[in-house]
Image (cartoon, rainbow, N blue to C red):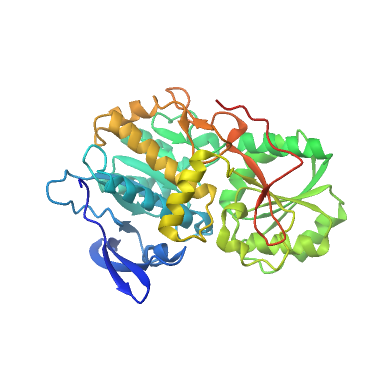
Amino acid sequence: MNGVNQSTRTRHGGTEERGDWVSINVMGRRKSKRVVRRAATVAGSIVAATALLATGTAMVAGAATGKTSKGSKSPIIVGEDWDSTSANAAFTDVTAKTIQLAVNQVNKSGGVLGHPIKLVIGNDESDPTKTPAVTQQLANEGAKFLLYNNGLPAPAKPTVQKLGIPSIGVTAVIPTFANPPDNTFTYLLSSPLSDWSQVLCGAWKKTGVKTVGVLRDNSTTTASLDNVLFPTLKKCVTLVDVETAPGTASDVTAQVARLKSHNPDAILVADLGGSFEILAQETVHQLMPTETRYSLATIVNEPTTWKLASPGSLTGVIAIGSLNPNNPQTKKLKSVLVANNGSSYAMTAFDAQAWDTIQLMKTAMAKAGGGNTTAKVNKQMQKISSYLASFGQPGYTLTYSAKKHAGANGLCGIVLQQFDSQNKPSKAYAKYQPPCKTK
């Protein structure tokens, strides 16, 4: 097999463990350490790396360490800006795990024309003042392609433009990253916020919702989302009140009480997910038990967060999702994820977007004759057409061109999902789904 050496494996009882070599950049000194990760738990394979990242800026090679097997070609270095330490880790850790899985699969099948992919990791903590420096750091490590697994990739654009390195915002939804100026090398694959607003407005019109109250956290990422989303939503409904609380809040009773005083037709919880969303949803459920509740694309993609909710407290919540179990590509990826993570693994849109990101990157590199000539790879990114996505409705595709750097083709990438009495988003929202035409 042409590729990299696989991670060492040892057995401890009935649980398989994998040992990955991690190169850490701490205070200007490079150190190597072997991290043992348990493969038996969903989150286990990223805990060790996350802990290391929290101590400083880390460069993680994972299974693709750059140590090539005898006769294999030199690695193609890919940089990942993985925010593993801020509140965004609720979704970036899931994304990072599947990015690594996809890279491992590429390397097992021979890499890109015989060249294995090697990941190097930086962490800007979704702090826009740090993003340019982390981008430059990854370039200095030799990165020929950049993956932004953070809350706000847009601050990287001027640096990316200067460096000339193709880049993908893996789960980013704010279209700024893919739009001019400085977008020669920047791409998106998620459904943008403009699509979210169309779907929410469509659902509200269909169900007679005219007034909406909003409860949000005070994160920079959420504020950026709201600045794009709210102006469009105000065209279809009246936002009677927008209440804000710290992401670390332990009580939002006062905020929900103020929302209740306006007697809105529906409540929208807008945040980064995690414990804040559980707190918000439970408080609304307690104080406004019959209220129709909506959520953005956070909690619906955070299986570990569902377990934090009190029994039945998420019942009926309608969230912006992206998975349709009838999509053949979704089924294929689900089988890969289950084989790697166990039969109980709950697939999310973050998994699908991470997986598709690596497939798009691999396709562009292969068509460019290799991954180390960034201009050629970038040109091939702009020629990818009708790529069948692992998320969205059956037949949903992504297409790029010199003028189209956001891959989404219409509203078919969105599926409104509804939580059941077991606090799981097990079904499509029956009253409304976005109009969808696929090939």
Residue at 43 percent across and 30 percent down: it is 183
In this view, the residue in front, 246 or 17, is 17
Residue found farthest to the left = 71
Residue 225 figure quarter:
top right
Residue 60 figure quarter:
bottom left
Q: Can residue 156 be seen in this snapshot? A: no
Q: Is residue 313 left or right of residue 392?
A: right
Locate residue 251, reporting x and y percent.
71, 68
Residue at 52 percent across and 52 percent down: it is 347
Q: Can you say which quadrant of the picture contains the C terminus? A: top right
In this view, the residue in front, 133 or 110, is 110
On screen, 52 above or below 74? Answer: below
Q: Is residue 97 left or right of residue 105?
A: right
On screen, 394 above or below 354? Answer: above
Q: Is residue 4 left or right of residue 282?
A: left
In this view, the residue in front, 319 or 267, is 319
Locate residue 20, reporting x and y percent.
29, 62
Residue at 60 percent across and 49 percent down: it is 222
Locate residue 182, reporting x and y percent.
43, 31
Q: Can residue 392 be seen in this snapshot? A: yes
Q: Is residue 411 left or right of residue 292?
A: left
Number of numbered discs on residues: 0
Residue 37 figure quarter:
bottom left
